[in-house]
Image: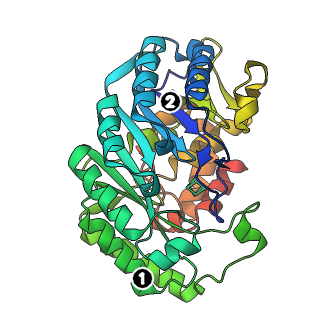
Amino acid sequence: MTMILPPLALYIHVPWCVRKCPYCDFNSHAQREPLPEAEYIRTLLNDLEDESIFAQGREINSIFIGGGTPSLFSADSYKALLQSIDHIIPIARNAEITLEANPGTFEQEKFLGYKDAGINRLSIGIQTFNDAQLQGLGRIHSASEAIKAASLARELFPKLNLDLMHGLPQQSQNDALDDIQQAIALEPDHLSWYQLTIEPNTEFHAKPPQLPVDETLWSIQEQGVSLIHDAGFNQYEISAYAKGDNRSQHNENYWEFGDYLGIGAGAHGKITLLDEQKIIRRWKQKQPKSYMQPTTRLVGHETIQAEDLAFEFMLNALRLYDGVPTSLLTDRTGLSKNDIKIAVNKAIKQGLLSPSPERLKPTQQGRLFLNDLLAIFLD
Ligand code: SF4
């Protein structure tokens, strides 16, 4: 069985924020001096030049500019960046191009400029509309700024995602549901609604805040999902909800085990090498200063071992509520149905995987106990 070249996406990381939020474990660095914006954009393009051999004739189907806080950079920088990217690797005409924006760095002119630069999907990190809770999360924006930013983005961009968190310190069930209602009223076509978790190497880990008790978390989850569904959104992944066909193309590509180049400090890439019939990962230096030095930019690369391929594929594919066509396993990994037959049968027997031969799809039980389901493919 042979793998075929999957669609290609591009992830671009901008690693600075105005300040570091106490719950954040992303590769983000508090801005202490003027940002080296022009130098960083040049470095991104050099990075892409080096990666361009991995395109293997493909166009870029989606671009995601994440962070950090990408909206710290100007629209002119992104315009120049996207134009140059298109010269290095052509960007597909209908590519989804997302930029993450923080309402605290929001300015009306910037949003207009982003649109003009070619950004067609804005993802705004709102988290909550409760000012006290925003402060507790260390966010620099207010609820009214978030509302203004989202309203303008809705007018300007064909696609709009709002990021919301729940399970926040001091948050009641009503607070969490109120956040969802306010988000829905702003008419996004996509919601990312995820629970706050305390991650190692964060301020919250060192000084944990008091989180809602399990009973409250459970009822927020249950009622929140049904509120979002009632507003016409479909949950298609653990934290992702879309109206109509407005799923995030970029994230779906990850979950369908597509390829992606990663440029920027700390960015990761996953690439299929067609001639060698293997899949590699490459990752970049996390510290912005070292990333900007050509000799220290790439810090690691590895080949995904044949025995890990089934697990790696499932780790992504089973996050999707609809699962994936069974044939995708061969296209993406070169494995055949027979290679995973024992694990599939075991998962079906345990009620974790749906018995359809056409799709690899978790059951409701499988979604609830995803780690148990994945562990079967690890064996
Ligand atoms: S704004 Fe986002 S990326 Fe930056 S520190 Fe806060 S959570 Fe992390």
On screen, residue 202 versus residue 61, left or right, reads right
Q: In which quarter of the image is residue 99?
A: top left
Residue placed under numbered mark 1 in the picture: 175
Vertical relation: 341 (above or below) 197? above
Vertical relation: 311 (above or below) 95? below
Asked whether residue 83 is in view, the answer is yes
Q: Which of 3 and 129 is in front in this view?
A: 129
Q: Position of residue 89 (x, y in %)?
A: 46, 15
Q: Nearer the viewer, residue 9 or 66?
A: 66
Rendered image: mark on residue 10: 2
Mark 2 is on which residue type? Answer: Leu
| Quarter holding ligand 1 | bottom right
Q: Nearer the viewer, residue 375 or 167?
A: 167
On screen, residue 106 versus residue 153, left or right, reads right
Q: Is mark 2 on a helix, strand or loop?
A: strand
Q: Residue at x 62, y 37 (%)?
A: 339
Q: Residue at x 50, y 43 (%)?
A: 72
Whether the residue carrying mark 1 lies under 8 Å from ligand 1 is answered with no
Q: Nearer the viewer, residue 82 or 336?
A: 82
Asked whether residue 304 is in view, the answer is no
Q: Quadrant of residue 175?
A: bottom left
Q: Where is residue 122 in the image (x, y as percent from the top left)?
A: 36, 46
Q: Can you tell which of label 2 and label 1 is closer to the viewer?
A: 1
Mark 1 is on which residue type? Answer: Asp
Vertical relation: 197 (above or below) 250? below
Q: Distance between the residues labelled 2 and 1?
A: 36 Å
